[in-house]
Image: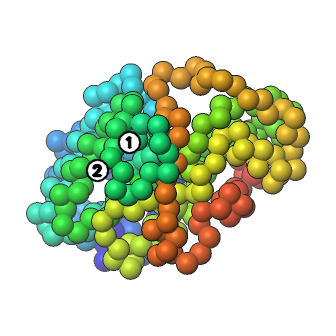
């Protein structure tokens, strides 16, 4: 079965392409999601039997300042892919974010009502809604994906390793390593699971996560300093965007969620400086 995997240069997509046979891995140069009007024609040339959309504009502040681009990549192009999937009767897999929630309650389940407080979350929920119109769809909602990019755990690790201070705000989320996310999602895809499901790590505050990183890699935790406000960020962030993963834990019978199971996937020797 020919599987189109978009975003194959990203954290999740680069892991996902390893888990399927007969993959057409699409980079931006093959299928640029900034041009939704071209997406249908390109899909019609590739003729995939299943689409796994791992591509997204994930820079939350850039989405806030360049809304048209965020809309095209996160909402309009997934909507065109959904139309293609409906017309050709194929399966469509899509990834959503904890940032569709306002962060006031936390522990969001599959049925919680979205209320985004930034444009990234807004653009992603518009994409989710289009994907839900595909009869054979799966939406995996996740949180704090980390891997090769310079995101929170990687920055914490590098700064502590280099003897630098780390400022953390006590906000909550559910971070997961891209390798565990890809494996968990691929298992659900291969078992024909459909609908919407949360797959993420366990709920943790960024401060506790930084302390766990220090402990796991035997680094000096005295450099971790709690800060009251997010600094240098343009878009608002939810205070507690953690996801409830009870359903995924009941379906998947392995530890994709614990902090330890995810930190142990970090390949710290091969991180760029
Ligand atoms: N990262 C997180 O913390 C997080 C949290 C919750 C949910 N998610 C969701 O999880 C999914 C995977 O995220 P990720 O962390 O793997 O993202 P990522 O590492 O930022 O990768 C994004 C991918 O999308 C591609 N892309 C961006 N703009 C494109 C365009 N115009 N045309 C075609 N491809 C384009 C990128 O290609 P280039 O290499 O060319 O830029 C890259 O391959 C996304 O749906 C995201 O919204 C992520």
Q: Is residue 83 left or right of residue 95?
A: left
Q: Is residue 231 left or right of residue 195?
A: right
Q: Is residue 227 left or right of residue 242?
A: right
Residue under the point 15% across and 70% down:
89
Residue under the point 29% across and 50% down:
128
Percent x, y of residue 33: 30, 43
Residue under the point 55% across and 78% down:
253
Q: CA distance from mark 1 to mark 2?
A: 10 Å
Q: Are marks 1 and 2 in contact (CB under 8 Å)?
A: yes
Percent x, y of residue 110: 38, 58
135 and 171: which is toward the camera: 171
Which label was assigned to residue 128? 2
Q: List the residue tagged with mark 1.
A: 100
Under tag 2, what secondary structure? helix
Residue under the point 38% across and 72% down:
189
Pointer 1: residues within 10 angstroms few (<14), some, or many (20+)?
Answer: many
Q: How is the image coloured?
A: rainbow
* Viewer-nearest of discs 1 and 2: 1
Quadrant position of the C terminus in the picture: top right
Check mark 1 vs ligand 1: CB closer than 8 Å? yes or no: no
66 and 200: which is toward the camera: 200
- Spot the residue most to the left: 87
The answer to which quarter of the image holds residue 122 is: top left
Looking at the image, residue 121 lies above or below residue 255: above
258 and 165: which is toward the camera: 258
Quadrant position of the N terminus in the picture: bottom left
17 and 72: which is toward the camera: 72
Looking at the image, residue 182 lies above or below residue 126: below
Percent x, y of residue 47: 21, 66
Percent x, y of residue 119: 36, 31
The answer to which quarter of the image holds residue 32 is: top left
């Amino acid at each position: 079965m020919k599987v189109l995997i978009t975003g194959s240069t990203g954290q999740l997509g680069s892991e996902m392409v390893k888990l399927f046979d007969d993959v057409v891995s699409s980079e931006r140069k093959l299928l640029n999601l900034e041009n939704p009007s071209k997406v249908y024609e390109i899909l019609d040339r590739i003729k995939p039997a299943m689409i796994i959309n791992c591509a997204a504009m994930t820079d939350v502040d850039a989405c806030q300042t360049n809304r048209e681009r965020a809309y095209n990549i996160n909402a309009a192009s997934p909507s065109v892919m959904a139309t293609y999937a409906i017309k050709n009767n194929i399966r469509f897999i899509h990834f959503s974010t904890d940032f569709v929630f306002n962060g006031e309650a936390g522990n969001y389940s599959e049925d919680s009502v979205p209320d985004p407080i930034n444009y990234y979350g807004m653009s992603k929920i518009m994409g989710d809604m289009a994907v839900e119109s595909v009869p054979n769809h799966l939406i995996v909602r996740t949180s704090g994906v980390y891997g090769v990019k310079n995101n929170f755990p990687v920055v914490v690790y590098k700064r502590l390793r280099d003897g630098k201070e780390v400022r953390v705000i006590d906000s909550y989320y559910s971070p997961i390593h891209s390798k565990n996310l890809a494996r968990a999602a691929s298992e659900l895809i291969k078992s024909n699971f459909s609908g919407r499901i949360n797959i993420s790590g366990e709920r943790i505050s960024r401060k506790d996560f930084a302390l766990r990183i220090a402990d796991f890699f035997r680094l000096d935790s005295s450099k971790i300093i709690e800060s009251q406000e997010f600094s240098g960020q343009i878009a608002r962030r939810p205070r507690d965007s953690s996801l409830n993963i009870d359903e995924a834990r009941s379906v998947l019978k392995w530890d994709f969620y614990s902090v330890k199971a995810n930190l142990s996937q970090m390949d710290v020797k091969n991180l760029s400086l």
